[in-house]
Image: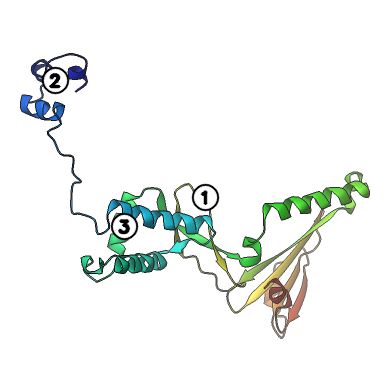
Amino acid sequence: MEAVTSGSSIREASNTFLVPYTTLNSHVNNEVLYDQVGRPTKFSIEEEVYLEQAVLALHSWGDPLSIEEFLHISEEYASSLNKSNLFPAGKPTYDWLRSFLKRHTNLILKKSYPLEKKRAALTSEQIEEWFGLLSKVIGENDLANWLAQLFNCDETGLSDSISYSKVLVHRRTSNAYRIQGGSGGKSFTSVMFCASATGFLLPPFVVYKSKRLYQEWCFGDHQRPIFLILKSNFLAKKKQ
């Protein structure tokens, strides 16, 4: 094709590159129809683009779709277009989803991690405000020269039941999160860590939801952590 475009005749290009004359002639004169190969898709190209945009929009809002949720949305969409009869089972299936993802390479399935609503609602302005306040406190109290008096404390929770469902996200997504209402699970253990700016670490503080403290829970802890048992996990409730 490039040779013909550069000035060679179709016959010359055919002999030079060993391409049948009729084939090359058809391509040069636009007599070849480049229709999509294979079985036609259930949705049109435009309709599938709408589905892809919906997935990306929900992902950008912090609420990516699981496989079941996407299939349900696709089923509702097919019903609104009177296309439910095009699917053998009357609704989109997992096989259709795999084909859909092959056609829309911007989307991938990725394992999600739970994210609490309060953490998801945190804004960049709030983070900047917090660091601004921290810098002000350090400056006013000359703590930059007294690092041993500067401590940071953080609490984390360990749940007995955390779901890691796969969700549809953009291909460039590093980590996928799904917003959840609470801590998840029935049992929740809270652990608090505190360390100074010099690296000195205080013993960890562990809160169990239990009526009694069992010795096997404390086995092997060389840093002598502090344990507290509560009938109901107060810290977990406060976080919710």
> In this rendering, is residue 111 above or below 142?
below
Badge 1, how many Cα within 10 Å: few under 14, some, many 20+? Answer: few
Disc 1 marks which residue? Answer: 174
Q: Is residue 90 left or right of residue 195?
A: left
Per the model, the C-alpha gap separating discs 3 and 1 is 21 Å
Contact, mark 3 vs mark 1 (Cβ under 8 Å):
no
Disc 3 marks which residue? Answer: 98
Q: Is residue 211 left or right of residue 111?
A: right
Q: Residue at x 50, y 50 (%)?
A: 173
Q: Residue at x 31, y 51 (%)?
A: 102
Q: Report the colour scheme.
A: rainbow
Whichever of callouts 2 and 1 sits on the residue coming sooner in the sequence is 2
Q: Which mark is residue 226?
A: none
Mark 2 residue type: Phe
Q: Position of residue 35 (x, y in %)?
A: 18, 44
Q: Residue at x 58, y 76 (%)?
A: 185
Location of the N terminus by quadrant is: top left
Mark 3 residue type: Arg
Mark 1 residue type: Ser
Per the model, the C-alpha gap separating discs 3 and 2 is 39 Å
Q: Position of residue 8 (x, y in %)?
A: 15, 14
Whichever of callouts 3 and 2 sits on the residue coming sooner in the sequence is 2
Disc 2 marks which residue? Answer: 17
Q: Position of residue 83 (x, y in %)?
A: 25, 65
